[in-house]
Image (tube, rainbow, N blue to C red):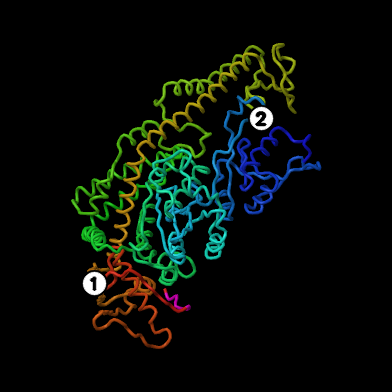
Amino acid sequence: MEAAKITPMMQQYLRVKEKHRDAILFFRLGDFYEMFFEDAVTASRILDIALTSRNRNEDSAVPLCGVPYHSAEPYIRKLLEAGHKIAICEQVEDPKLARGVVQREVVRVITPGTVTEADALDERGNNFLAAVSSGANGFGLALADITTGEFRATSVAEEQSLFDELERARPSEVLVAKNDRAMRARVEKRFPRIHMTEVAETLFSELPAHVTAHGARLRQGQDPDRAALAILNYLEENAPESVRVLRDVERYEASNYLILDEVTRVNLELVANFAGERKGSLLAVLDRTVTPMGARRLKHWILYPLLDCERIRERQRSVENLLDSYPLRDGLRAALRKVQDLERLAGRTVTGTASPKDLVAIKLSLQGVAEVKACLEAAQAEILPKAIGELSELPEVVALISKGIVDDPPFVLKDGGYIRHGFDVELDRLRAARTDAKDWIARFEAAERRRTGIQSLKVRYNRVFGYTIEVTRANLKAVPPDYIRKQTLVNGERYITPELKEYEAQVLNSQTLIERIEADLLAKIREEVAARYEALKQTSGALAALDALMSLAEAAASEHFVRPRVHEGLDIRINEGRHPVVETAVGRGAFVANDCFIDPQSDQILLLTGPNMAGKSTYMRQVALLVILAQMGSFVPAGEASIGLADRLFTRIGASDALS
């Protein structure tokens, strides 16, 4: 493209694009995000949208495509799934007030691990951003989900253990240092579908520019903390507001949970079957959750079974209390159905992306929390007392949103009308003036008909010319001299008058003010709700645990599970055990229950014999699944069970054993 032919707007685009060469630039032009040059070619192919061009009849034609800004989320998701980074460049000044080119700047860079748009996320699973660091004593791994606030880090001595943890978390993006190409190659080879991002080595060692509470507590030099620092620094660069969403980094040891390597998790079909689908997995059998955060918590419990007998028994007691009271379960389920994804909704208030509909969802969820507390208090049931003690209805938040936001706000902010009448005096005055405009136009039209004698005269509004007076050709001779001709039509003419244009300016100015005041009020409400983020976070965590426990109780009730005795010994005694997934598939009456007795003193090893398809693999998987169920605090499908804690499971299942 010749420099002389580059428009000021395109010069602005090129300046912005120069700073974000590795991203597809969504450049806001009016109601669309436009993409140009190679970005347009790439995006049009992935999104299956039309590729056109600016200056199409000239040698300097520029490839172009675009998507509506108010429905961009599905397009963003497709580009992320294809492994692309996206830079969102917004108009940061009112086009009506701009002198020359509207000022624009990149407000967000979206990567697979930093996406927050609801349509781009799996609501029943986490979206982890991971960082991996190599050290003399092993590897550091940090995981953060900026939509839920989860932030944890660990160290492992062996590469295989690192891969096991990555497989367990399944992050959508992994950060590695640019000077550690070997690590990138190994992770990429093992997990070809995970997006790899190379970052400067300094991100693993320097405190964030704006030292956060998270950063101040990290110990530089240790592998897990180096990985956590990389995440904080990366977020500071690409999604700075999201840092406030993260909880304090939780240091965990993989050895504190039942170790399940990749082969074991896949072969046991814990959260997905051999085809990668949820159907036919242990998760599919257990998941009776009614909230997205409860579903995420249950999945975490399956992947991280406990090694602490007391924590296991605490969950068992809660499940038992719920199982023993159908009215309590029924009441809680009805209340929980009113709770939406409070965990992610709260995060969006902090990042400043919560819409009016999100705020209404928070209000409705907190009203559901009040019903949950009432159910628990009425039943006086002992269900995770510490977590339940963290439930808060936050009546001041409910009152603020009820007072400030209408019950059914529009999806598109530009449509306005989301701030409730009576919340702001100035806004109410301007709205009244806008409503009076229709009456004023009607009065003006009637007066002009009387003055001119043209009974067919009409006052119309057009986006290009604003308010105009339309006169048919048959009445042109009656047009008064103070009418100023604006446009010729097929059947007549359009005119304006100084009085009409003066009133139009007042109306348009009031509309601009209304939009600005509504946006400011929304931001203030959002900030006040965000100020209660810690309480919202604790409440959503307690609700997630309660929903997961409810799910285990519902599964136990419908599938006839029993409470196992969990102990620190080495023996396993299972009477009339059943494979939970296979039994669900074939029906309870069709599955033949069986026993398993393992004793380190006498029966340490069992030798299984039989022809192909006799059920040997099913039996082995059944025992393994019952151990996992017991150690995650669930009841188990058996007549009776006593299970000693296991610290690791190994399985080998035949390639054609996908029986469920």
Q: Is residue 599 left or right of residue 516?
A: left
Above or below, 451 relative to 29: above
Q: Identify which amino acid the numbered label 2 is placed on.
A: Val
Residue 314: % across, % down:
23, 59
**In the drawing, what numbered circle is on residue 101?**
2
How far, Cα to Cα, is label 1 from label 2?
74 Å
Tell me if residue 460 comes above or below residue 348 in the rendering: above
Q: Position of residue 126 (x, y in %)?
A: 43, 54
**Crowding near pointer 1: few (<14 within 10 Å), some, many (20+)?**
few
Of mark 1 and mark 2, the one earlier in the sequence is 2
The label on residue 347 is none
State the image quarter where residue 567 is shown.
bottom left
User: Is 201 covered by the magenta stretch?
Assistant: no
Q: Which residues are magenta?
A: 655-659
Chief secondary structure of the magenta portion: loop
Secondary structure of the residue carrying numbered label 2: loop
Query: Which quadrant of the figure has residue 504?
Result: top right
Outermost residue to the front: 136
Q: Where does label 1 land, which residue?
A: 569
Q: Nearer the viewer, residue 236 or 576?
A: 236
Disc 1 is placed on an element classified as loop
The correct choice, above or below, for 498 with respect to 136 in the image is above
- Is residue 54 left or right of 547 when viewed as pictured? right
Residue in the image at 29% along x and 57% along y = 550
Amino acid carrying label 1: it is Gly
Q: Position of residue 471 (x, y in %)?
A: 69, 21
Q: Residues within 10 Å of mark 2 (few under 14, many from 20)?
A: few
**Which of these two is toward me, 646 or 596?**
646
